[in-house]
Amino acid sequence: WAGDSVKRKSMTGIILMLAGGAIAYKAKYQEVIALSTTEAEFIAACDAGKIILFFRSLLEDLGIPQEKATILYEDNNGALMMANAQQPTRRTRHMDIKYFSLLDWVEKDMTILQGISTHDNAADAMTKFLPRQLFYRHRDTYMGKRIPKHILARTSSSVLNK
């Protein structure tokens, strides 16, 4: 949060994965100054939502129906609660309304926010310095060399439910 020591802007890091590998990424300072970590994460989640919607539309155009919501992993509990509250609160009313489009996308089942531990969040490699082993682990994830445990757990549970 507020990683730019001069302008106090936060860094957004997004990695979009499909079929085990990264198909899109974004690492950039946010356009606005976030007043909290939760706000910075919520803004980043909205940016990720825009990328998700673009690729969902592209897949639809290619004849691949998008029947289920795309999972957006978020490691900030406050941002998760904001997205699931479905409305601005007195603490978030100062935020630009454009960021609340994320709530609409969640409501329409286009995306769903799920919690993920910071330790398992591969996008952290794009926004902060990490210990060498953790950086290599995340790199192997988005290069398609390693399947994260949260994906393995989801895959094995869906196989068991069939």
Image (tube, grey):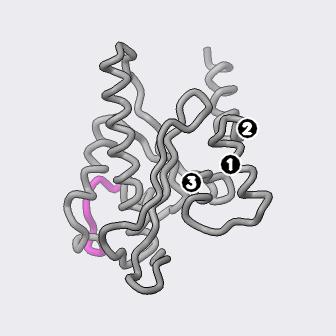
Is the residue marked by circle 1 packed among few (<14), some (14-19), or many (20+) residues within 10 Å? some
Left or right of 94: which side holds 133? right
Q: Residue at x 62, y 42 (%)?
A: 142
| Numbered label attached to residue 152 | none
Question: Which one is in front, 135 or 87?
Answer: 135
The amino acid type found where label 1 is placed reads Arg
Q: What are the residue bounds of the magenta stretch?
A: 85-91
Residue 56 location, x and y as percent?
36, 30
Vertical order, 82 against 153 (above or below): below
Q: Residue 123 sits in which quadrant?
A: bottom right
The amino acid type found where label 2 is placed reads Arg
Which residue bears the numbered disc 3? 123
Residue 89 location, x and y as percent?
27, 68
Question: Which one is in front, 59 or 162?
Answer: 59
C-alpha span from label 2 to label 1? 9 Å
Nearer the viewer's eye, disc 3 or disc 1?
1
* Pointer 3 or 1: first along the chain: 3
Which residue bears the numbered disc 1? 139
The amino acid type found where label 3 is placed reads Ala
Q: Is residue 57 inside the magenta stretch?
A: no
C-alpha span from label 3 to label 1? 9 Å
At mark 1, the secondary structure is helix
| Numbered label attached to residue 146 | 2
